Amino acid sequence: MNAAFAALSLVHLRTLDCLLHLKNLSHAAQRLGCSQSALSRQLAHLRQAFDDPLLVRQGRGYVLSERAEQLRAPLQDVLHSLSALPQPAAFDPARCTRRFCLAASDYVAEHMLPLLVAALEREAPGVCLGFRTWQAGDYPLLANGEIDLATTLFDDSPPNLHGRVLGEDRVVCLMHQDHPLAAAERLGQADYLTYGHVRICAGGDKDSFVDRHLRAQGLQRRIALDVPFFTATVQVVASTHYLATLPEHIARQLCLRHPLTWRALDFVEHTQRYWVVWHQRWQGSPEHRWLRERVFALWRQSQFSVQGSSPLSP
């Protein structure tokens, strides 16, 4: 028995069953709630464990190898037997007394926390919440349990994390409604570089793609202010000629409540993906599952979410 086979877990078996059933990596990733790159890593481990390709590329799709065909029925039997094991008692949120820690931006704290706290007061009054601003290097805090759940931006979830995509959005440029650039329909690169910029340095990666694009041309924008808060960014942009680069759905909401406007970028295209992420150690926890499903449902209902502003569909 090789080491890869000996290290197979129930998660690996369920992943294999899903792959053998769907024969499509993107569809399987969506069903399993993980990124396609994370699923590709699991498939590589399974191929090593069984010493077989399992899924074989044919045209634009996949077909099962002979070994994979042989595995389908026994794998179903194993998973069926495991599903027959006694299940834990049903989780009752009204009796839960756990403390959870959430991490996100101050924008999420301002607009989503009131909805979540109100829901918890009704449904799980014994639950307590802590909140901290999410930083790009905070992934170890998910692993050690200091953070239970985070909302952030990235293209693919890192290893050992489970996640659920909340939506997608493009990035735009926020400015004062009387800004000299407000007369343009879209912003060109030269205009974008003419003014100073406010960069929101906390939360997910919102705008480094712009800096990478500019560096490739030997250019850089002037970061006049680095600040971790959306609220401070709004106040500065509303009282200066500085620009801020941020997701369109947030820009739209801010423009409804402040003397601001936004313009699309004409020189670079970038789509961001919003995730709720948690460490795999909590994947099977009934309490944790209930919390993340509640957060996801409230996000979808909120007018401040990415869905509330009709951006790109997930």
Image (cartoon, helix red, strand yellow):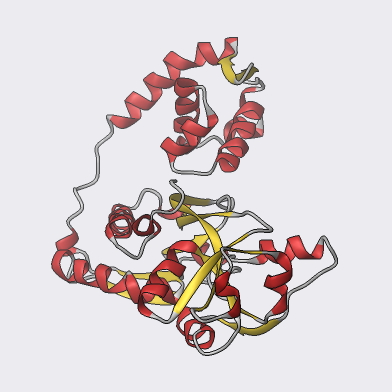
User: In the current view of this chain or complex, which residue is farthest to the right?
Assistant: 218
* Residue 64: image location, x then y, percent: 56, 15
- Number of marks in the rendered image: 0
Residue 147 can be seen, yes or no: no
Q: Quadrant of the N terminus?
A: top right
Residue 83 can be seen, yes or no: yes
Residue at position x 60%, y 85% in the image: 241
Examine the rendered structure and indicate whether residue 153 appears above or below residue 220: above
Examine the rendered structure and indicate whether residue 270 appears above or below residue 58: below
Q: Nearer the viewer, residue 238 or 92?
A: 238
Examine the rendered structure and indicate whether residue 165 appears above or below residue 211: above
Residue at position x 56%, y 88% in the image: 240
* Residue 271: image location, x then y, percent: 56, 53
Q: Nearer the viewer, residue 276 or 226?
A: 226
Q: Is residue 302 left or right of residue 138?
A: left
* Residue 270: image location, x then y, percent: 61, 54
* Residue 40: image location, x then y, percent: 61, 36
Residue at position x 56%, y 63% in the image: 185
Examine the rendered structure and indicate whether residue 275 appears above or below residue 69: below
Residue at position x 48%, y 63% in the image: 248
Toward which corner of the image does residue 198 lie, by quadrant? bottom right
Q: Is residue 52 left or right of residue 91?
A: right
